[in-house]
Image: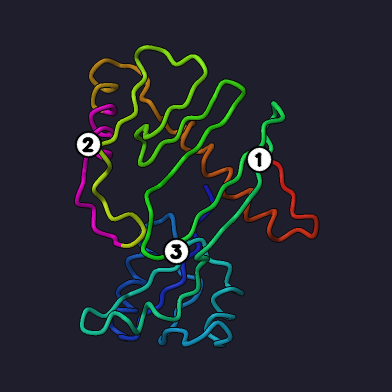
Amino acid sequence: MSELSVVIIATDSEQRAVLQVLVDGTGVARTVHSCASFPMAGTDPVVRRIHSASPGVALVDIPSDNPTTALHAIEAEDIAVAILEFASGALGVLQATTAAYPGYPRRLEVTGSEGTIVLEHDRIVAADLRNPPANINADTARDQNQSSSSPVVSDVRGHQAVFEDFIHAVQHDSKPACDGHEGRRSLAVIEAIYRAAEKSDGVADV
């Protein structure tokens, strides 16, 4: 198994040394670069050095007394849009953002020849079907989490359902609703979107 390359970013020299010893001592990872300062902008030489090291993981020591110094200059996407074409010929649109005020629930809309179903936080909030089955009902009890407007998880029902399903699968030697193989499919889509963004034609296969 190949080693995991790690970049360490820590302003405290002793903490930086400790982290390097811990990483290199794992036997499965090695430190390829360490930084004594946080990048102040996207053009900062520190960013270029980190990129050139091609790390699999960036380990950042965030000071408890002033965490903003480690966080404000780290670049990340705040909006993504992709058009998906399925093997069946069906089309889909993926939109994600952390920049839309005030933040809205995670939403999935599925439209076909027989109608439309809308889910928010994994709950059906609308089911407009030509011939709806008797056992389908819109769940109007909205998830109470604040979604992208806050990192606080105040409504744990979604997490609870995942744990209960996993425990049931272990106890009954059955397959969980979302196993590792299914989870990798979602990751494969995200990786394909990144690859498409780097190509001139904007297209990548999953």
Q: Say which label, 1 or 2, has the lower sequence index.
A: 2
Mark seen at residue 120: none
Magenta highlight on residue 162: yes
Instruction: Determine which residue is flagged by label 1.
Output: 206
Mark seen at residue 160: 2
Q: Position of residue 203 (x, y in %)?
A: 74, 49
Q: Say which label, 3 or 1, has the lower sequence index.
A: 3
Please report the residue visible at 50 percent of the width from the left and 73 percent of the height from the top.
75
Residue type of the residue flagged with mark 3? Ala
Magenta segment boundaries in residue numbering: 150-166
Mark 3 and mark 1: span between their CA atoms? 28 Å
Mark 2 and mark 3: span between their CA atoms? 28 Å
Please report the residue visible at 34 percent of the width from the left and 17 percent of the height from the top.
174
The quadrant holding residue 111 is top right
**Is the residue under label 1 in contact with that under label 3 (CB below 8 Å)?**
no
Mark 1 and mark 2: span between their CA atoms? 31 Å
Indicate left or right for 194 with 198 as reference.
left
The quadrant holding residue 136 is top left
Q: Callout 1: few (<14), some (14-19), or many (20+) C-alpha neighbours within 10 Å?
A: some
Q: Position of residue 177 (x, y in %)?
A: 38, 26
The residue mark sitting in front, 3 or 1, is 3
Residue type of the residue flagged with mark 1? Val
Instruction: Determine which residue is flagged by label 3.
Output: 100
Q: Position of residue 35 (x, y in %)?
A: 44, 82
**Is the residue under label 3 in contact with that under label 2 (CB below 8 Å)?**
no
The quadrant holding residue 54 is bottom right
